[in-house]
Image (cartoon, rainbow, N blue to C red):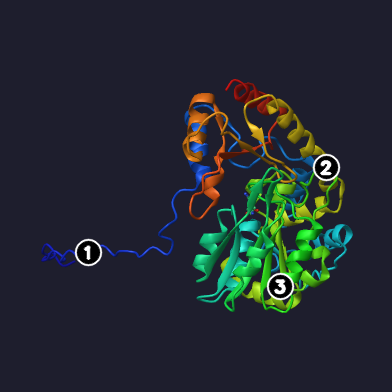
Amino acid sequence: MNSTSTTPAPVAASPAPTLRSKLPEVGTTIFSIMSALAVEKNAVNLGQGFPDFACDPALKEAVSAAMAADQNQYPPMPGVPVLRENIAAKIAAIYGYRYDAATEITVTAGATQGIMTILLACVHAGDEVIVIEPVYDSYVPSIRLAGGIPVFVSMELDQHGYSIPWGKVAAAITGKTRLIMLNSPHNPTGFVLSAADVQALADIVRNTGVLIASDEVYEHMVYDGQRHESLSRHPELAQRSFIISSFGKTYHVTGWKVGYVAAPAALMAEFRKVHQFNVFTVNTPMQYGLAHYLANPAPYLDLPAFYQRKRDLFRDGLKNSRFRLLPAGGTYFQCVDYTAISDLPELEFAQWLTAEVGVAAIPVSAFYNQPKESGIVRFCFAKQDATLQKAIARLQQI
Ligand code: PMP
């Protein structure tokens, strides 16, 4: 051993590398902020959208059985065949459009990854993507990461609730428009596309090269006898659409992060080129468990009645309060106008409500590119009845 070692010469200090942010405008999401405040203030959390009740034990058993049967290695890149077959069969049974399970359906790590992958696959630098505000928070950062330019069209609000101004959507289409992003049933407003809306959309995009990403994660939460106008019901639109759904919403398992995307084969081929390199595939036992459970239509067919009862319980509880209830035709969200109670901006009102009244809500202004104050906050009613009752008792006091 060489014993003549000397102290190494000090290395000249080099400046730490700096990173130019790809998403400079992105901070902590409003959902994390309000959930943290709800915990700190011991408030009832009707902010973030997730159920506070368990999923069906049969679903847990199906996943556990798959794991116990050693279905634990890489599945095929687009998802296990039986799950894709069952998804295709479900879509055909309820919406009447038959996707080919081999080439037109891909299982994703939740809807979020499906949306990101659609954008990465379709959008080239400088392409424009039309989004309808208020807009779910992952869309715009995903568009920007893909190099696209978001173009905003605001929903309109009157005494009948929110609506999409199709004339403004048509006017927003330029030679650079690559994609329109839609979400129905809509988070946060509860708006549900009607057949007339779908027809208006078809008229606008006909003879253009514009694609559509249709976020239908709340497809089984449509109330009052309305039907969900999946774009897959509309053969002309289905030809240019990616349809996105999420088992997290439908089966009360938001933490599992398993969803799927359906699209015509040519679009799906491009989607899969990106998918295979950003996740490759989604965990195996969940896929087998979901495939088994999906074969029984009862759980998703029963979902509208299940959530409509909760919506009505919540609405009845607030009907004599000073909140004005907006229409809530779909999703598990109820928006309320609080302008009879306070003239605070929405974020401050939501913080006050959490801290002083003990019920967390989400300001709808957080869903706008340029925060827009309408005096409206969003409550999530995917909660046990006891949780809703507790929140109602507090909200009635103000
Ligand atoms: N789209 C919308 C409109 C949502 O509300 C959500 C969940 N909050 C998602 C997508 C994401 O779904 P997932 O958890 O399956 O990624």
Q: CA distance from mark 2 to mark 3?
A: 30 Å
Q: Nearer the viewer, residue 305 or 371?
A: 371
Q: Position of residue 281 (x, y in %)?
A: 65, 64
Left or right of residue 293, residue 360 in this image = left
Specify whether tag 1 is near ligand 1 (CB below 8 Å).
Answer: no
Q: Is residue 296 above or below residue 140?
A: above
Label 3 neighbour load within 10 Å: few <14, some 14-19, many 20+: some
What residue did someone put label 2 on?
Answer: 224
What residue did someone put label 3 on?
Answer: 205
Q: Position of residue 377 (x, y in %)?
A: 58, 39
Specify whether tag 2 is near ligand 1 (CB below 8 Å).
Answer: no
Q: Nearer the viewer, residue 360 or 71?
A: 360
Q: Which comes before the other along the chain, label 3 or label 1? A: 1
Residue at 83% in and 63% down: 233
* Label placed on residue 7: none
Label 2–label 1 contact, CB within 8 A: no
Secondary structure, mark 1, is: loop
What residue did someone put label 1 on?
Answer: 15
Residue at 77% in and 39% down: 307
The amino acid pointed to by label 1 is: Pro
